[in-house]
Image (cartoon, rainbow, N blue to C red):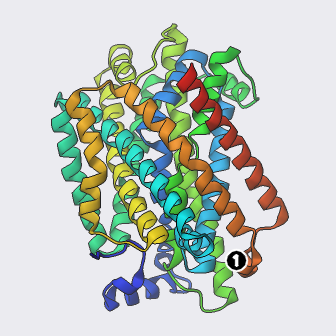
Amino acid sequence: MTTTSPVDTRDRPAEHVASELGALRAKGRLRGRAALLGPAFVAAVAYVDPGNFATNIESGARFGYLLVWVVVMSSLMAMLVQYLSAKTGLATGQNLPEIARGRFGRRTRTFLWFQAEIVAIATDLAEFVGAAIGLNLLFGIPLFPAGLITAVVAFGVLALEQRGYRRFELAIAGLLGIVALGFLYDLIAVGHQDPGGIAGGLVPGLDGSASILLVVGIIGATVMPHVVYLHSALTQRRVTPRDEGERRVLLRWLRIDVGLGLGVAGLINLSMMLVAAALFHRIGATDVDSIEAAHKGLGTYVGGGAALAFAVALLASGLSSSSVGTYAGQIVMQGFMAWRIPLFLRRAVTMAPALVVLALGLPTTDTLVVSQVVLSFGIPFALIPLILVTSDRRVMGAMVNRRRTTVAASVIAAIIIALNVYLIVDTVLG
């Protein structure tokens, strides 16, 4: 069975491809340059998915501005990782799973595909639950019907891809903008920010084992395996450079795209923590450790408008990240195994476990935690191949990593993998 690939221009109508390439190559026109932006904004939604809400809010509520440095550092780490992924697609014309299929034997790539599918299900679990909670908070809809509504909306967002990837990118960027506006409103509504405290939080510091666990939670979940695969696919055939000069131009705009997209995600994460620090930590409500508790607290201490903005942001986060997760799942299956199934069938299969969880009424916060632990298992299988590929001149050509880039990426990978192992062990044995 086949379906339209989310990244392969060979599967799109010729007139769509011609118009896209024409816009991308328009010299000296804002529209042409702006058309180069977009992939990083799609990837960025994974960094502000519902799993990030509880961690950032709990950190701010319990420790105030103490862990601001963690959010800043994790955002910089994310920028480098996603840049390497995007560069892979531009340099090779292939995505990371496709390259892995060519480098590894059948057993290895089958294993990589299988674990990536488990990660995809865990991703859907967190994002569907988050969107369902958002609908529940906004309209009082029970979680299972809210999950079904989420599925319908996600199908609608995915349908945009059939009419060109640009529409899908704009829809996802719009949802990301809603998340950003929601927390900007809450940041203004809460007020009471302490600039000195924020500046002090930029200096690394800890306060006991509880703060260490939250550091692990923030940094350990920084890199989501599915968007490492996805970002390379979003840039692999977006436009084929005709010469080395055009390749350098595309690489420069790729850096700008990553800086803007991941920068927005970092600011959203930071605003989550600042809202919790300025509100809950300041008044001594340090036990706020769930999405529902944060929503209730905003309504109680700030007002209905702040609670509404929070719930809308949560819903937009769940809907956008859920759609992006399906995009990534299609890339993984096609890349590792060269299998292709209809995108909507894939959506139905991967969302089924999330709907079962909602139908059974399992604890939502515990579900989010479990999903993050499962995601942690997939990180080494995305990061290590990414570093190996981008440091190989035979694959990357002139775009191969500089030595310091490979060293920095390796250090980041080691930190993230070590923290995720710690998180898994602590969750399982703690």
Q: Where is residue 75, by image quadrant?
A: top right
Looking at numbered disc 1 in the image, what kind of residue is underneath it?
Met
The residue indicated by pointer 1 is 396
**Where is 169 relative to 374, above or below?**
below
Residue 66 visible in the current orientation: no
In the image, residue 87 lies at what x, y percent?
A: 63, 70
Q: Nearer the viewer, residue 398 or 44?
A: 398
Q: Is residue 407 above or below residue 193?
A: below
The N terminus lies in quadrant: bottom left
Picture quadrant of residue 341: bottom left
Rendered residue at 67%/23% (across/down): 212
Residue 356 placement, left or right of 71:
left
Residue at 18% in and 31% down: 139
Q: Residue at x 60, y 28 (%)?
A: 425
Residue, far front: 107
Q: Residues within 10 Å of mark 1 (few under 14, many from 20)?
A: some
Residue 204, percent from left and from top = 75, 29
Classify residue 265 as left or right of residue 412. left
Residue 429 in view, yes or no:
yes
